[in-house]
Image (cartoon, rainbow, N blue to C red):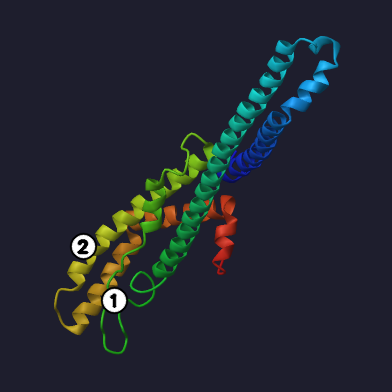
Amino acid sequence: MDYEAAGNSCLGWGTFLVAAGAFFFSLGWFLLGISKQANECLRKRRWFRALVTRVSVISAAVIILLVGGSWMVGGGGTLTTEGWNLLDNHEQRNALVRAVAQQWLLNGVNMKRPPLSGTPYDKIDGKIDIYGTLETSALDSVLTSGLWNFGKPEEQEFLLTVVNYEHALTRANALFGIVNADLLQTGTAQQNMLKAERHQKNVNASEWYGALKLQHQKMHELLLRNYRWAVMEQGKW
């Protein structure tokens, strides 16, 4: 049962218990208020002619109704609170999945732009493009949120895919920094353009960038398979 289903279940049962508890608690006070009339009614019954029996029965009924009603209201309130907390967790998870889908899209766009793709410099003035930082903040938030259960197969798959994708992105960003340090070394325009082309070729042929593209694709496949709603919300797929 996921957070949404569990939350709705808790809310349903909690509301029922609160309503039922309030009814029984009110009934207890009502019975207490008409205890004299109840005593007179019972006195006409064969088994309740003794005063002590009538008092005991009425008192027991009042206590059971008041205590039981209070317990039901308290338990229902606890269940209701738990239900709202579970629904809040559900909304937080949805928000994080949505953020992961957005960052997957942004990273995909950046991977199709210079200097990773196309001409890695401006053809007019020869100014070279440096490698930008790919986004990992949503992935990090998922891993630190504690909102997924590693013991559940589907959630475990999501967490492992996020971990692998985040590691590939972090590694790529670190190596992009090394490439950028070389690209920013001064030289003639021609030298800079040749260097930019060489780095682009080396990056695209590298094992680590190939690993990033693989994890990027796996993240895409998982989102489409298990969280299509988050994918479709982006409006560009």
Q: What residue does disc 1 label?
A: 129
Q: Which of 117 and 141 is in front in this view?
A: 141
In the picture, residue 189 is in which quadrant?
Answer: bottom left
Which residue is drawn at the image coordinates 80% and 11% (left, top)?
49
Which residue, as the protein is rendered here, is positioned at the far bottom? 124
Q: How many numbered dots are placed on residues in this image?
A: 2
Which residue is drawn at the image coordinates 48% and 52% (left, top)?
92
Q: From the viewer's perspective, is residue 52 above or below residue 218?
A: above
Q: Upstream in the sequence, badge 2 or badge 1?
A: 1
Q: Nearer the viewer, residue 108 or 186?
A: 108
Which residue is drawn at the image coordinates 19% and 79% (left, top)?
191
Q: CB under 8 Å between callouts 2 and 1?
A: no
Left or right of 137: which side holds 191?
left
For the C terminus, give its image quadrant: bottom right
Q: Is mark 1 on a helix, strand or loop?
A: loop
For the N terminus, give its image quadrant: top right
Q: Where is residue 11 in the image (x, y as percent from the top left)?
A: 62, 43
In the picture, residue 171 is in which quadrant?
Answer: bottom left
Which residue is drawn at the image coordinates 51% and 45% (left, top)?
85
Q: Position of residue 218 (x, y in %)?
A: 48, 52
Three-letter amino acid code at the position of disc 2? Ile
Q: What element carries label 2?
A: helix
Three-letter amino acid code at the position of disc 1? Asp
Q: From the viewer's perspective, is residue 124 above or below residue 184?
A: below
Left or right of 92: which side holds 76?
right
Q: From the viewer's perspective, is residue 127 above or below residue 173?
A: below
Q: Which of 121 and 97 is in front in this view?
A: 97
In the picture, residue 43 is in which quadrant?
Answer: top right
Q: Where is residue 54 in the image (x, y as percent from the top left)?
A: 74, 15
Q: Position of residue 6 (x, y in %)?
A: 59, 40
Q: What residue does disc 2 label?
A: 178
